[in-house]
Amino acid sequence: MTKNEANRFRAILNERIAELENFNRQRDGITIERSPDQLDEIQRASERALAVCNLDREFNQLRNIRAALLRIEQKSFGKCEECDEEIHPKRLAAIPWAALCIRCQEALDHDPEQMPTAGGDFLANAA
């Protein structure tokens, strides 16, 4: 990966961090408010659960983005953390914080217990 590409991804990742940090400051959706109406209570509990799930997803993405920035600094950005192959540029364009190539990610999504190892025949393990 060239220095210009790394700088472009660094800028994209830093911009996304700013968006996520702004989103995470808005935690009003998880406040607990009591209501005398039981249906309102149920509705608010459902909304609160959704807000918590969204916050969890955003925090996980924030963690992954910070890890990607660290990989840029360590000059390992763009290489799969599992098989050490290059991550396709289209994948990085879509998900700049991706740590795995598409093949390793699919294997992980298919069966997390059978995560391939570098140099192994992971297609056989994933099937």
Image: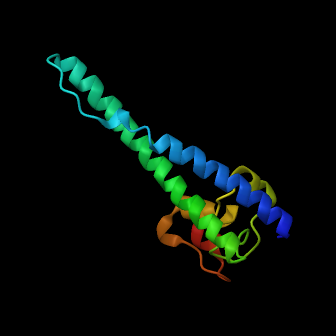
Q: For the point 31% across and 30% down, which residue is it?
A: 46
The furthest residue to the bottom: 119
Q: Quadrant of the N terminus?
A: bottom right
Relative horizontal placement of residue 86, taking residue 81 as reference (left or right): right
| Rendered image quadrant of residue 28 | top left
| Rendered image quadrant of residue 78 | bottom right
Q: Is residue 80 visible?
A: no
| Rendered image quadrant of residue 121 | bottom right
Q: Nearer the viewer, residue 112 or 63?
A: 63
Q: For the point 64% across and 65% down, which residue is it?
A: 69
Q: For the point 62% across and 75% down, which residue is it?
A: 82
Relative horizontal placement of residue 55, taking residue 1 as reference (left or right): left
Relative horizontal placement of residue 42, taking residue 96 as reference (left or right): left
How many numbered markers are drawn? Answer: 0
Q: Where 25 sits versus 47, above or below?
A: below
Q: At which x and y percent is residue 33? A: 22, 28
Q: At which x and y percent is residue 127? A: 59, 65
